[in-house]
Image: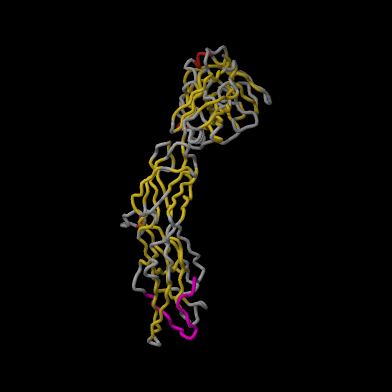
Amino acid sequence: VSFGGQDYLVAVIKTNRSTELIVLLVCTNGLCTSSGDWTSRNIYDGQFVPTRPILMLNEEVGDLYVFARVKPSGAGTAEEAIYYKKTALDNIAFTPGDIGIPFIRDTTVLHLNNPTSTKQNVNSATGLVVLAGDDQLDTYFHNYLAFAAETLPVITSFTPTSGVVGTEVTITGLRLTGATEVAFNGTPASFTVDSDTQIRATVLLQSSTGSISVTTPAGTAQSASDFTVFYSPEIFSFSPGSGPPDTEVTIVGTGFTGTTNVTFGGVSATFATDSDTQIRARVPASAPTGKIAVTNPAGTATSAADFVVTIPDTLTLAPVADAQVKSSSPTTNYGTLDSLRLREGTPSNPITYHSYLMFNVTGLSRPLTSAKLRLFVTDGSDHGGNVSTTSNSWLESSIVWNNAPAPGAFLANAGPVTTGTWVEITLPASAFAAGNGTYSFVLITTSSNSTIFYSREGANPPQLVLTQ
């Protein structure tokens, strides 16, 4: 059956499952050749011993009826009768433990069974008739449902769901013939009635976001969801007018509905559209001083003034990943520990620990004057480790001794470190010659006396302090 622009193939079956005894099968993709094309809905469980289901469809209004023989008093009782359940085809829902509605029942006739009908697809012209027989009385019984003719129009869907002035929208529904008006949020549109189930309407100037309505001599139908109308954005102001990367900027204007991009000096930013008149956006790390632009499907607005990106002299960065690795547990990952341990194994105790750190450096716009790695010591030692470069080819969640990248260029030596203090290791500015980007370091000690620092999961996580 077709309803509301959607084709349905439906079947009702009896299974051998006590919790899903009578089941409705539904296919809507037009293929219906494999199990993946079908979905199922549970109609009856075994509580009332249902059997012999039949299916009928009121194709005018999209109602689905399932009739079955049930035992109204439950298993182990004699009486059998015909009951039915009803649901909307476009929103199928049943309560499996509910017996349904009695349709053919007579307490003096105990063996009503085998419901049947002469027509499966019904409407207001045919009504609905179901017959059932009592094989002990050799008698048939029937009942009839009359359906009132539907005259009111119905909107079941529309596409597209958004657009600019001039967009053509295809409206699908029922009883659309004779339409006298189509409106977008109350504003009339130009339209063409293609058939009783389809209208094409064009969004006109002054239309606004809201529901679509179709009016015929019989009445007015309203869409369940809104059509979104996009207008070209305008930027009136923004605040603050300057700030470093990651500053939140409030942009005020109009036409912000449907915003797809906000840029600072041509660099895309993360943003949230609060309303048609306000957006909050964060200054991107690499944004230069420049105009703010807001883009939606209707166009792009550019601010009259520049947003001035200020670069702080000192950047303090937390690691995005860190972890220790252990020679005696070469396949174990320690990325979630709150500690970073260093130790060089000895012949009598050959266990060795190395620790890795990764930083994402952003906000550099000038040459560095200093770079320092700061670590908080939780267990001191005579040697706090050597710092070397290493590859970025590792993840905190998967680095182990066996896959840890090898040390690269030596950068600095920490010297002795004391428990409960911060140690600052001066790194050469040349280590950051590439500018903004990702940098990884490995800490290795020559001492068999362990050094332990807090990791980024600890109370005092590592810091990379860069001054430009």
Query: Does residue 459 lie above or below 382 as drawn?
Result: below
Is any part of residue 203 visible from this angle?
yes
Whether residue 423 is in magenta: the answer is no
Q: Nearer the viewer, residue 229 or 109?
A: 229
Task: Tell me where residue 235 appears, x and y as whole percent.
Answer: 53, 26
Q: Residue at x 51, y 18 (%)?
A: 290
Q: Residue at x 51, y 30 (%)?
A: 270
Whether residue 113 is in magenta: the answer is yes
Query: Does residue 94 lie above or below 111 as drawn?
Result: above
Query: Does residue 211 lie above or below 319 as drawn?
Result: below
Q: Residue at x 61, y 22 (%)?
A: 374
- How many labels were placed on the picture? 0
Direction from residue 468 to residue 221 in the image, left or right: left
- Quadrant where the C terminus lies? top right
- Which residue occupies the extreme bottom position in the image? 137
Task: Tell me where residue 443 appears, x and y as whole percent.
Answer: 54, 24
Q: Nearer the viewer, residue 343 or 226?
A: 226
Task: Tell me where residue 285 appears, x and y as whole percent.
Answer: 52, 23
Direction from residue 377 to residue 285 in the image, left or right: left
Magenta-highlighted residues = 100-116
Query: Does residue 349 lie above or below 51 as drawn?
Result: above
- Which residue occupies the extreme right position in the image? 420
Q: Nearer the viewer, residue 43 or 224?
A: 224
Is any part of residue 335 visible from this angle?
no
- Quadrant where the N terminus lies? bottom left
Task: Tell me where residue 138 appears, x and y as whole percent.
Answer: 37, 87
